[in-house]
Image (cartoon, rainbow, N blue to C red):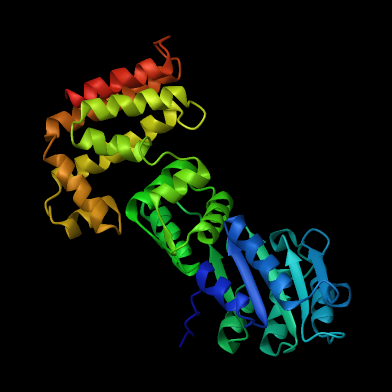
Amino acid sequence: MAVKRESATFTSLNKEIKGGTFRNIYVLQGEEPYYIDRLQQLIIDTALTEDQRDFNLSLFYGNTANVREVISTCRQYPAFSQYKVVVVREAQLIPKQPGHKDDLDLFASYAEKPLPSTILVICHKGAAMKSKAFTDQLTASKSGIIFDSKKVHEGRDLDALIVNYANSLGCNIDNKATRMLADHIGTDIARLFSELDKLSILTDDNNITPLLIEQNIGISKDFNIFELEDALARRDAAKAFRIVDYFERNPKNNPTMASVAMLFSYFSNVLLAATARDKSPEGIMAVVGTRSQWRARKFIDTTRMYNTRSLINIIGYLRECDTRSKGIGSRQDQYALLKELIYKILHA
């Protein structure tokens, strides 16, 4: 019977390592390089002091690494330290040796009985390792952990990531603040986490609020794409045009193409909600792919302001504006196009 592999998240490993608990072997693999880079550096910083690194930190790079040499280094005891840390970076570049299907499988023998004082970190970027013998042994012996570093996508994955990371810092973050960060920063994980780290230090009551974000990151809590969505959802023309005027005065942080893309995603979800068989919040959550009941209710509320035909027309207006904003079939200023789009949406 196959042994079930232990699951791990960035947040759980981050907390574990910061607490001084280490695995004998870490395999950090996948498409998102940020998590891999941050975890391997966190292991080094936590397990070894600056003075200990000269004798107890060994770095190997995939294009020049010899797996047998890496294993030999892993079997050496630390000097003047509790741990020896061995890191293999860019392991996906390790060349295959003659007679071996995959050189990484040579780690299988080490995974069977690793040296307790050694922390081996293998960073494999771009995809999962195909070294079945090694990963099977690692799972069976429970001598380490395999972390899958997955790309984060816009929508529910990004919202959940923001909330979970804020919680890991001991902070709460409300829906509006979450959407402000998601819309403004997107899937740039390094910047997103850096901003959340900063906000967690600046908050007095462990709450990350829209006001805190506005004061310290420069995203307006009253004039952003999230507020524009709300204004359009309520058919509040005065507020919608005030927001677009603000965008025009602050073009660097509010490019038209980004606004159009966000609105396209929003109204596409509203259309899905309008045509869904199950119109309960739970049904809409499943259809649009969100874990936020609050977000699902917002889509439902918007369907009360726009019928299906209007929503289909709005999707057409958004596609047309996207094309024209790229200079195809129009020489209008981008914010003139955005104002025209807002007018069409409000009168759809």
> Horizontal placement of 170 versus 104: left or right?
left
Relative image position of residue 189 (x, y in whole percent): 54, 52
Residue at the extreme top of the image, as rendered: 331
**Quadrant of the frame with the N terminus:** bottom left
Is the residue 34 above or below the residue 245 in the image?
below
Relative image position of residue 297 (x, y in whole percent): 19, 51
**For the point 77% across and 76% down, which residue is it?**
48
Relative image position of residue 313 (x, y in whole percent): 20, 26
Is the residue 296 above or below the residue 36 in the image?
above
**For the point 60% across and 64% down, which residue is it?**
29
Residue 150 seen from this side? no
> Horizontal placement of 271 versus 229: left or right?
left
Q: Nearer the viewer, residue 189 or 127?
A: 189
**For the point 42% across and 43% down, which residue is it?**
183
Q: Nearer the viewer, residue 215 or 1?
A: 215
**For the point 60% across and 88% down, which residue is it?**
141
**Quadrant of the frame with the C terminus:** top left
Relative image position of residue 139 (x, y in whole percent): 56, 82
Residue 205 seen from this side? yes
Q: Nearer the viewer, residue 237 or 328?
A: 237
Looking at the rendered structure, the number of numbered marks drawn on it comes to 0
Q: Nearer the viewer, residue 277 or 92?
A: 277
> Horizontal placement of 341 versus 167: left or right?
left
